[in-house]
Image (cartoon, rainbow, N blue to C red):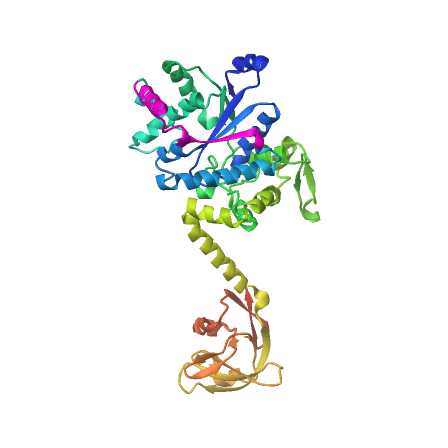
Amino acid sequence: EVIGEEKLLQTLKEKDISLYWGTATTGRPHVGYFVPISKIADFLKAGCHVIILFADLHGYLDNMKAPWELLAQRVKYYSFVIKAMLQSIGVSIEKLTFVRGTDYQLSREYTLDVYRLASIVTEHDAKKAGAEVVKQVQHPLLSGLLYPGLQALDEEYLKVDAQFGGVDQRKIFTFAEKYLPGLGYKKRMHFMNTMVPGLTGGKMSSSEEDSKIDLIDPKEVVEKKLRKAFCEPGNIKENGVLSFVKYVLLPLSKAGEFVVNRDEKYGGRIVYSDFEDLETAFAKDELYPADLKQAVADALNELLDPIRRQLDNPEFNALKHLAYPETVKLDKLRNEAQSVNRAADPSRLDIRVGRIVSVEKHPNADSLYVQKVDIGSGEDRTIVSGLVNFVPMEDLQERKIALLCNLKPQNIRGRCFKLIALDRHLIDADVVIFADILLPVIIGVVSEGMMLAASR
């Protein structure tokens, strides 16, 4: 959408226009940023002079989404990420001007204009202007009411012809057109792009973790988030996954294509070069949500790969933790999860079938048996099992059991054991706590007299 189209056409006859796009440095940037970034690329190709404003003060005023002590670090973080995004789609950052809001918004002149504006703006108009942008609460802080006025003044202090933003900024844009002339400043033109729906409905937001995919999310996290995304079969009206193809993946595809790789029995590989064809196929249930989600994950990971590579360096990793201290804990949890996943890899389990050759009561525990088991290694191995209350001793003799053989030796009631039997009763008896590798198990009888545990 354009506000001031006639003025735009007239200005273009006289000169190339200048414009700015501002982003409040609050939550970590997400893949929805590709929508304005791709449009900025179009502006540059058209010969426009573009300023990117890192609106740190705005982030603080918006219900303190950016704490004051973190403003400088978050500006650096946004600078790293936005530049990496631009370069990933082939935009030369030399053609851009980057400005930090507090470099001029704390000046005497700007501050006086804030007071001048406050003397003519009504509380109703200030609240209405920020309704789609500033966090709404029952008893709003005064800072949130100042936010729209500062954004309007930015147009004058950046000396631009136009401001560019999402359609959620429309009320702030009309606010600026109404009030800037009251300070003796000219009206600007305003350009708006659509907003990409989030994964859970509504717009994709930096401050709502479940709604977004971060630009530095690992591949497996991208796939996991997309699998959980709302994508109702046949629903083309409220579908963030489809919208992302329309506004990001297809426009930024070098080949102008969106590829869905399916198994041949489900229709095989299909290529869409027109979004309407994709939308129609989804509406008719010719393309299923699972296939669409996987195709979006594949295309998005390909788009994010160069950004991940560029930001995979010690300087950015340190900056990430300074700008967003909570990521220290998140990274620790992720690393621990990856470690657990490696430890829980079923291929690491040495599971063998053995034959019980002798059974006796544990001398120091009435509920435990000590069994000698032949596992075909030429030497009988000793195990312990909590089966006394469940299986008579004679029923265990010569029985085949599945064993986990690569555990560290453990002392159980004064006896050393190196194996663990994968048996339902054993697990119920909690003896499995001695294992190095803990896996959920399902038990099934695979042959008469033999029990098998399989990872789930």
Query: Considering depth in this image, is 320 or 6 the residue closer to the camera?
Result: 320
Query: Considering depth in this image, is 142 or 90 the residue closer to the camera?
Result: 90
Q: With respect to residue 388, does 55 lie above or below?
A: above
- Start-end of magenta stretch: 94-119
Residue 239 appears in the figure:
no
| Displayed quadrant of residue 169 | top left
User: Which quadrant of the figure contains the C terminus?
Assistant: bottom right
For the point 39% across and 17% down, which residue is it?
Answer: 180
For the point 42% across and 24% down, which residue is it?
Answer: 154
Residue 424 appears in the figure:
yes
Q: With respect to residue 247, does 382 lie above or below?
A: below
Residue 268: where, in percent of width, then height? Answer: 70, 45
For the point 49% across and 49% down, which residue is it?
Answer: 317
- Residue 100 falls within the magenta-colored stretch: yes
Residue 132: where, in percent of width, then height? Answer: 41, 29
Q: Main secondary structure of the magenta part?
A: helix
| Displayed quadrant of residue 301 | top right
Residue 189: where, in percent of width, then height? Answer: 49, 18
Query: Considering depth in this image, is 368 or 404 the residue closer to the camera?
Result: 404
